[in-house]
Amino acid sequence: DSGVTQTPKHLITATGQRVTLRCSPRSGDLSVYWYQQSLDQGLQFLIQYYNGEERAKGNILERFSAQQFPDLHSELNLSSLELGDSALYFCASSPPPGNTEAFFGQGTRLTVV
Amino acid sequence: AQSVSQHNHHVILSEAASLELGCNYSYGGTVNLFWYVQYPGQHLQLLLKYFSGDPLVKGIKGFEAEFIKSKFSFNLRKPSVQWSDTAEYFCAVTTGGYNKLIFGAGTRLAVHP
C-alpha cells in the first residue's frame, strides 16, 4: 500500500458525460500528479499541483481540468467524454521538493461506452 | 523537452535467465532516474532510483541499474529472473525540483517457468 488513495476504482460512463476522479495523497506530501495510462499512449503526464497551485502541465486536454484543495486532496474532472478517454488514470504524490520518488495510487479505470 | 526511450517493448525469458532492459534519456542537465514496476492489475511501484553518487544502484527484489552519464543510459539488470518478475517495467526521469516524472513506453516482461 503506497498511502495514496484513489476513488473510485472503476467507472463506466457514456460518451458526452462528465466524471470526477479523486485522489488523497500520502500524509505530508504536498505534490500531486495525474497520469493517464492507455495502450496506445503509454503513461502520459497530465498535470501537477503543489500545495494547491498548479506547477506543471503535460498532455492534458482542454476538456480535462484538475484542482488541489486546502486539505491537499485533488480531483481530476473529465468532461465531454469520448471513447478515446477510456484509460487508467493514476494519481501520485511526493514530499516537498527534493530528491525523492513519487508514490502511486491504485488508479481509476475509466471506461467510456 | 526531455524524453525516455526503452528499447525493448516485449521480453520473454525462462526462469533463471539474466535480464537487461535498456533505457536512454535525452536531457543535457542533471537528472534523477527511476525504474518502476507494474505487476498485472496493480499500481506502479518503485524498484530503484538514482540521484547522485555511486552509478551502480541496487533496488528491491535483486534488481540493479547502472547510470552511464556518457551514454545517457540507465539500464536495469537482474542476474536470475523468477516467474514472479512477470510485469511491465518503466524507466522514468525527472529534472528540476518538482519531480514531474517522464516515463518511457514500458517493457513487458514475461518469465516462463
Image (cartoon, coloured by chain):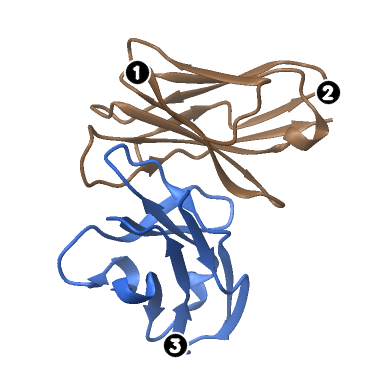
Chain colours: A brown, B blue
Q: Name, please, the residue furthest toward the front.
A: B28
Check if mark 2 and mark 3 are on a common chain. Answer: no
The answer for which chain carries disc 1 is: A
In the picture of the structure, the residue carrying the numbered disc 3 is B18
Which type of secondary structure does the marked residue at label 3 adopt?
loop
The answer for which chain carries disc 3 is: B
x, y percent for residue A94: 31, 36
Mark 3 crowd level (few <14, some 14–19, many ≥20, 10 Å Cα): few
Q: Which mark, residue A110? A: none
Look at the picture and state if A60 lies above or below B29. above
Residue B58 image-quadrant placement? bottom left
Residue at position x 57%, y 43% in the image: A44
Residue B28 relative to residue A57: left or right: left
x, y percent for residue B83: 52, 76
Check if mark 2 and mark 1 are on a common chain. Answer: yes
Amino acid on which disc 1 is placed: Leu
Q: Are marks 1 and 3 in contact (CB under 8 Å)?
A: no
Mark 1 crowd level (few <14, some 14–19, many ≥20, 10 Å Cα): many
Marks 2 and 3 sit apart, C-alpha to C-alpha, by: 46 Å
Residue A97 image-quadrant placement? top left
Q: Quadrant of the C terminus of chain B?
A: bottom right
Residue A85 image-quadrant placement? top right
In the picture of the structure, the residue carrying the numbered disc 2 is A15
x, y percent for residue B108: 59, 68
Q: Nearer the viewer, residue B73 or A16?
A: B73
Residue B68 in sight here: no
In the picture of the structure, the residue carrying the numbered disc 1 is A72
Marks 1 and 3 sit apart, C-alpha to C-alpha, by: 43 Å
Amino acid on which disc 3 is placed: Ser
Which type of secondary structure does the marked residue at label 2 adopt?
loop
